[in-house]
Image: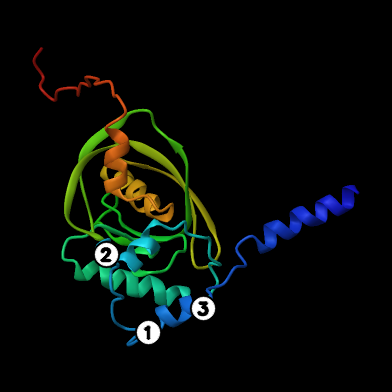
Amino acid sequence: MRNFIVLILLSVGVFGFSQKFSKEEKELILAGDVKTALPIFQTDNEVQHQVLLAQSEEISPKDKNLPILIERMRLALAATGGGVGIAAPQVGINRRVVLVQRFDKPNAPVEYFINPKITWWSELLNKGTEGDLSIETFRGDFYRSYSIRLEYYDLENKKHDEMVEGFTAVIFQHEIDHLFGVLISDKLEKERNESYKTLQFYKKSNSTTR
């Protein structure tokens, strides 16, 4: 029995992300000119809204169509002229893939993250204004953890683990919410029923006088 259990565990480790895109997903990813942006789904379209509300599943990092999806998501984000992140459900694919602009890195590059998972959230929160590429003209003020711990995979199926802080951490939280079918319009309603405690923080002065 012990050997049988070990075999199962090893199988999970090897094939954990073996799931590939479905036929329908491939058709959407490869639709039209693959060198152009995919259209961004909107909540005012009932069919697209249901996709945005659905839970996303993990995807094999080695799927041959994944680089195409990532590039078309990147082009879709760039075409917004100011968006800082996008999740796969926003282009009609309910898979755990997000792109985030890394303001915590030099030149603020846009990077992809496969099967991302937040494993820790700080109790310290920031409150800031957020919009959504899928909800036209909607903006609101939201509480987000100031820092998070993030796990994700790259296209070589290599696992990464890092701490992220500040505005970039906010973007990750927003985009990963999309993978759970959570929109900021829903989050706003939830926060109205919660209470928060304001804390005062201080920064050391650079002045030489006291």
Q: Tell me if I can see residue 141 in this picture.
A: yes
Quarter of the rendering containing residue 28 = bottom left
6 to 126, vertically: above or below: below
Image coords of residue 193 (percent x, y): 30, 29
Q: CA distance from mark 3 to mark 1?
A: 15 Å
Sequence-earlier tag: 1 or 2: 1
Tags 3 and 1 in contact by the CB under 8 Å rule? no
| Residue closer to the observer: 61 or 102 | 61
Amino acid on which disc 1 is placed: Ala
Left or right of 76 on screen, residue 176? right
Seen as rendered, the residue at the extreme right is 1
| Residue closer to the observer: 195 or 49 | 49
Amino acid on which disc 2 is placed: Gln
Circle number at residue 31: 1
Q: Which residue is mark 2?
A: 42
Q: Which residue is mark 3?
A: 64
Tags 1 and 2 in contact by the CB under 8 Å rule? no
Q: Residues within 10 Å of mark 2 (few under 14, many from 20)?
A: many
